[in-house]
Structure formats: structure tokens, C-alpha cells
């Protein structure tokens, strides 16, 4: 087993990180070590052969990597218009990779100790205005069909709970407690949490489940809650398309994704006086620092209201 695969298996089976992170880290590591191979073997760079590169990657000597090479790679990425955030993610992948191999004794020194992440300007989470959300759910935008009812339920559940895309597509009927009006989700690192929802969401779930049962002639508590029209489990791209389609009807935001609705959930809750620690628990954040970014949106909202309302603002 090559050093990259061994590390990715460690992330998957021991650290239990998300599949998205594993894929991203795997791509970042292969990109860096392919860059290293091209430096060692310029003839391969001139005529890249995937099989030859794959063989070289399996037998790469990771202990021979020095910090200056990593810095050169970072500069090369920036010169090729890779933004600072993406470069920092690649650096995080390498740091995690070398920490693991230092821990198991594959290497004796860690070149990443001399590498610092790039400074990036903090971006405030983008969110949808309350009026736009109201317009989305108050107008007859959703078709009167199984797909239309399902799509509305997906969007409403994202906004009612702030859950992640991966959490939503993995929901099963047994995770919904209609009596208590709660949903159980499995978050990052297999951490479970219970999220409450309101009366409107409960009524919509009851209606959707009834429509689904009728459409497929029955259902099982072990079935996935959201499925395609041929009863397959919903997949991320399908949910992205659904969210993008309906958000495009109500907002001019350039990015229209499930995560934007998550940002919207947190921002609207905070704007209406919710305790930040409660929002942290609802979102499933491991630290308060990840949640505190939403306070900036609330401060900007307060500033806007102040400028509009105060006679000497």
C-alpha cells in the first residue's frame, strides 16, 4: 500500500473525516507529489503517462521532501491563479499527511514545520435575506408532483435545521421523530445531534412522507428519506441542482448552494436573538470559533439599521 493510500485510509477509518475531505486531500497530495516527480524526472513532465506517474507515486520517497520545494510549489500555484484559500487547503493536506507519517515512523522529520499558511482576508458568510426566503416558500413555485413536494421539503428542511448536505441525503425515515418534532443527524466524525423543527416543517414532512408512500406504494423506516423518482438515494449533485434552481428564482446571489441555506439559517437565528452557543450546537460545530463568524453578519445588520434610524448617524 502506497503512502498516500495509507494516509487516506487512516482518515476514513480512524479519523472518520468526511468523504469530501478525503477526496480533496487525496487530489491535493497527488498534485504535489506529481509536481515533485516532474522535477525529478523532467522527461516525464514533457510526455506525461498516467501509468508511469502512478508507479512513481507508489514508490515516492516522502522523506526526501524539503521545505524550500514546498514553498516553490506554493508560488507556482499562486502564479497559476490558484487562490490563497485553495493553497492553504493543500498545505493543510500536506501538514496532516506528514504529521501522520511522523507519528507512525515513516519519516523522521516534518518539512511542514517550516511552512506557514498564507494570510487571507476573512469573508463573511453569504446568506439570503428573510424577505427572499419568505417569497420562496409563500409563492406557488413548486410543482404539484412528487418531485415538487420533495424539492420543497428539502429546501424547507435545510432552512429549518441548518443541516449539512451530507447530513440531509443520509437521513432515513427512522431519524425523523414527528411526535417530538426533532430530527437526528449524523455529522462530521460520526457525531450525532438532535435538531428540533417547528410546526410548519412538521406538517410538510407529514405531507411529503404520505405522498412518498403513495408514489412508491409503501415505505420502510430504514429507507432514505429523500430519493429520486426511481427510488434511488438522493445524491449531492441532484440536491445542488434543486437548490440552485429554486434559489435562482428569489435571489441574485452568485452562489446558490445548500451551504448558503445553512449560512442563512444561522444568520437569521442570530439576528432574531438566538444564543450563539445554541446555534453552535444546532450546526454541529466542534468549536465556538466556527460559529462566531456569523456574529459579523449581525453586526453589519445592526450598523445598517443604526444608519437608517439614527438622526445623526
Image (cartoon, grey):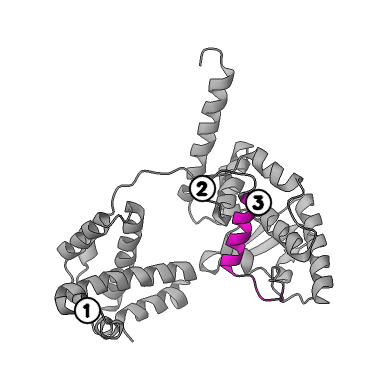
Is 201 left or right of 252, judged from the image as shown? right
Q: Mark 2 points at which residue?
A: 254
N-term mark: 3 or 1: 1
Disc 3 crowd rating (10 Å Cα; few below 14, some 14-19, many 20+) is many
Which segment did they paint magenta?
A: 230-247
294, 210: nearer the viewer: 210
- For discs 3 and 1, the disc positioned in front in the rendered view: 1
Whether pointer 3 and pointer 2 mark residues with C-beta atoms closer than 8 Å, the reply is: no
Q: How far apart are marks 2 and 1 (CA)?
A: 39 Å
Residue 284 in the image: above or below residue 264: below
Q: Disc 3 on helix, strand or loop?
A: helix
Give x and y (percent) for residue 238.
60, 66
Looking at the image, the residue that sits furthest to the front is 47
N-term mark: 3 or 2: 3
Q: Is the magenta stretch mostly helix, strand or loop?
A: helix
- The residue positioned 51% from the left and 45% from the top of the image is 126
- The residue positioned 22% from the left and 61% from the top of the image is 113
Q: Residue 47 carries which label?
A: 1
Give x and y (percent) for residue 155.
67, 55
193, 294: nearer the viewer: 294
Residue 83 in the image: above or below residue 302: below
Amino acid at each position: 500500500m502506497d503512502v498516500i493510500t495509507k494516509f487516506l485510509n487512516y482518515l476514513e477509518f480512524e479519523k472518520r473525516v468526511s468523504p469530501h475531505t478525503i477526496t480533496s486531500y487525496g487530489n491535493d497530495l497527488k498534485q504535489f507529489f506529481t509536481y515533485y516527480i516532474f522535477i525529478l524526472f523532467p522527461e516525464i513532465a514533457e510526455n506525461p503517462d498516467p501509468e508511469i506517474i502512478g508507479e512513481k507515486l507508489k514508490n515516492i520517497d516522502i522523506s526526501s521532501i524539503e521545505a524550500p520545494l514546498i514553498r516553490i510549489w506554493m508560488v507556482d500555484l499562486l502564479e497559476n491563479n490558484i487562490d490563497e484559500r485553495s493553497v492553504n487547503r493543500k498545505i493543510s493536506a500536506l501538514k496532516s499527511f506528514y504529521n501522520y507519517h511522523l507519528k507512525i515512523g515513516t519519516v523522521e522529520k516534518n518539512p511542514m514545520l517550516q511552512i506557514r499558511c498564507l494570510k487571507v482576508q476573512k469573508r463573511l458568510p453569504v446568506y439570503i435575506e428573510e424577505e427572499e426566503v419568505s417569497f420562496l416558500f409563500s409563492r406557488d413555485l413548486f410543482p404539484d408532483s412528487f418531485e415538487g413536494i420533495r424539492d420543497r421539503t428539502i429546501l424547507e428542511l435545510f432552512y429549518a435545521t441548518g443541516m449539512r448536505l451530507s447530513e440531509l441525503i443520509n437521513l432515513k425515515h427512522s431519524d425523523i421523530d414527528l411526535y417530538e418534532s426533532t430530527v437526528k443527524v449524523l455529522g462530521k466524525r460520526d457525531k450525532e445531534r438532535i435538531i428540533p423543527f417547528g410546526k410548519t416543517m412538521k406538517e410538510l414532512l407529514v405531507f411529503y412522507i404520505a405522498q412518498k408512500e403513495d408514489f412508491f406504494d409503501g415505505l420502510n423506516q430504514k429507507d432514505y428519506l429523500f430519493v429520486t423518482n426511481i427510488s434511488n438515494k438522493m445524491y449531492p449533485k441532484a440536491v445542488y441542482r434543486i437548490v440552485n434552481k429554486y434559489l435562482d428564482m428569489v435571489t441574485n446571489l452568485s452562489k446558490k448552494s445548500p451551504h448558503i441555506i445553512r449560512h442563512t439559517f444561522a444568520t437569521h437565528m442570530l439576528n432574531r436573538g438566538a444564543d450563539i452557543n445554541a446555534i453552535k450546537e444546532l450546526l454541529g460545530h466542534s468549536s465556538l470559533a466556527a460559529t462566531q463568524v456569523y456574529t459579523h453578519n449581525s453586526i453589519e445588520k445592526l450598523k445598517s439599521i443604526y444608519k437608517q434610524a439614527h438622526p445623526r448617524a
